[in-house]
Amino acid sequence: MPTSPQLPRSAPFAEDQIAALNSVFSVTTAEQRAWLSGFLAGMQAANAPQGVAASPAAPPARKVPLTILFGTESGNGEALAMQARKVAAKLGFAAKLVDMADITPTQAAEARNLLVIASTWGEGDPPQRAVDFHEALMADGAPSFEKTRFGVLALGDRAYAQFCEIGRQMDERLAALGGTRIADRVDCDLDYEAPAGTWIDAILGKLNAETTADEAVTDEGASIIHVDFARPVADGFTRAKPFQAEITAHVRLTGSRSTSDTHHLELSLEGSGIEYEPGDALGVVPHNDPALADAILGAAGLAGDTALRSSLVERLDITTLTRKQIEDFCQLTGARVPEAGWETGRQVIDLLDAAAQRLTGAQLTGLLRPLPPRYYSIASSRKSVGEEAHLLVAGLRYTSHGRDRAGVASIDMTARHRAGDRLNVFLRPNTHFRLPADPNRAVIMIGPGTGVAPFRGFLQEREAVGAAGKNWLVFGHRNYLHDFLYQLEWQDWLKDGRLNRLDVAFSRDQPAKRYVQHALWESRHDLYAWLKDGAALYVCGDMNAMAKDVHATLLRIIADQGNFDEAAAKAELDAIRRDGRYLRDVY
C-alpha cells in the first residue's frame, strides 16, 4: 500500500506550513487527494494567463465505461453533460453522452457507472424529450439497477414549488431499483454553474481515485482535470460574457388601442461570430428597473448606497420571491414566517415592506439570487437578414396584490431601450426545434402571440433555400385590428405561395373566446391528413395554458379522425413525437 506523500523541506513553504500540510496529507485518502488535485488545478487554470492550458492528468491504465445521461428543456443540462464528458475523456474514461430521448431504462441499467443530469420543467414536469424515459423509470415494470453505480445532478428553479422534482424522483428511484450512489444528489438553482462544476469535479475525482487504486497507479497519477463551468469560454459569448448588440430598429407592432404592447427589435450581430439557425434563441442579459431598486433600498433602510444600487440594477434578481428567501429572511430578522403560498404573486419588495426590518447591505444581497438571462426565440433567418437577429418582445405589465408590476427584460427592452442603444446578448442553440432536414416535408406551425416569432424565421429560411414543402401557420391573438403581428408579411407569403395556409383566432373579436385550439378543431380533417402525410408540427408559446390546450386538442383530433380511443390516440401522438415530427418550444 503506497504511503501518503510528504513535502520535502525544500518545498517553497515556511517550515510551519510544511508541517501543517504534512499533517493533513498524512491522514488523507486517495479520493481526498484526487479531489484536492482537481481543486488546485482549477485554481491554477482560473488564474493562468489567457490561452495557457493546465497540464493534462495521467489517465487510468484502462478505460472505464461511463455513461452521462441528460434530460433538458433549455439546453443547460446538455451543455453541462457535454463538458462533463470532456473532463471524463481527458481522465481516460470511456465516456458516452446520451439524451434521455434516445435510451430506455433497460438500456441505462446496463451502465456500470451512470451520471444523470436531470432538469425539472415548470411545476415538477420532466423535459419534453425525457417524458418517455421518466415514465418508464417510474413504472412498476422498471428494470433492476443493482449493477449500476450512479449520481444525480438536479437542475431547477426555486421560484417553483416543485424545485428539482424530477432529479429528486430519479435519484430516489434509481436507489430503490438497487443502484448504488457514487455521491449524494445536488440540487441546483438558476445559478447552477458553480455547484454543478463542484459536483462533477467531485464525482469524477472519486471515480478516478477508485480506478487508479484498482489499477495500482501511484498517487502522482491520480489527479483530475478541473473545468470551471462558470468561466466563459474563449471562443464564444455567454451570459457571463455577452455580446453588446446594437439595436438598429425598434418598432411597436401592436396598435395604439391594443391591450398588448409588442415590439419588433432588430439587433446587429456584426463582429460577434454568432451563427444561429431558425429555432434558436437569443439570451438577453437585462437590467432591473432602477425605480424598483430604489424602493428596495428604501424598504431595507439602505437608501443612498450607490454601489449597492448598481448591484441591484445590474446583477441581482430583485423581483422573484421564493419560499426559501422568505424563510431565510425570517430567520435573519426574527419576523414571523407567513403561511404557505403567501409568496404567490408577490415579489421581494412585498417581503421587505411587510416585515419593515432594516438590513445591512450584505444581508440584503445574501437573500437575492443572481439575475438570470431571459431567452427570446429569434424571429429571423440569417440567410434572409445577414448579420442581424430579430426579436419579438411583448412588454409585460400587470397588477398583483395592489401593486403595479412589470416584466424585467421585456420592459427593459421595450421601454428603456431605443434604436442606437445596445443589448447584452448571447446565443442559446435549440437543436430540438429545427426545420425538417427534408425541404420537401410539410410543416404546421402553431404560434399565438409572440409564439409566432420562430415561424417568421422558418418561412424566411424556407424561402431562401427554395424548400418545396407546404407551410401552414395557425396564429392567434386578441384583436384582428390591433394585434395581427407581422400581418403584411404573412399575407405577402400567402400571395406568392410560400405560405400555403393561414388560420387565425382572435379571442376578443366575438362574444365567445376563440383560441388557436378552436381553429385546429375546426380544421381537424385537414390537419390529420397533413400529419398522416408526414407533416412536422411545431408549437411555440405559453406553456401553462396554450400548450396544454393545444396538446389536448391534438389528442381529441387524432381520436376523432382516426377513430381511436384515448389510449390509442395518445400512442399515435407519442409516435409522431418520437419520429421528431411534434416539436414544442414552450415557456
Image (tube, rainbow, N blue to C red):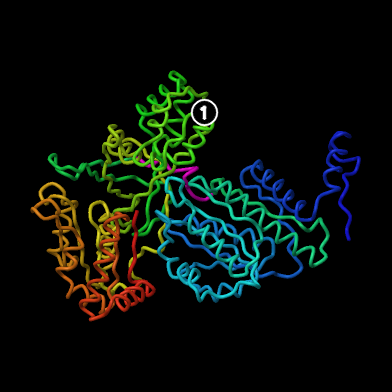
Question: Quadrant of the rendered structure where residue 81 is?
Answer: bottom right
Q: Which residues are magenta?
A: 234-246
Q: Report which residue position mark 1 lands on.
A: 334
**Observer-nearest residue: 282 or 5?**
5
Side (left or right) of 158 relative to 461: right
In the rendering, at what x and y percent does residue 306 appear?
46, 21
Please check the rendered image and state whether residue 236 is part of the magenta-colored stretch, yes or no.
Answer: yes
Side (left or right) of 242 relative to 490: right
Q: Disc 1 marks which amino acid?
A: Gly
Residue at 87% x, 50% y is 5
Residue at 41% x, 31% y is 351
- Main SS, magenta region, reads loop
**Extreme-left residue of the structure:** 510
Q: Is residue 585 above or below residue 411?
A: below
**Extreme-bottom residue of the structure:** 563
**Observer-nearest residue: 381 or 443?**
443
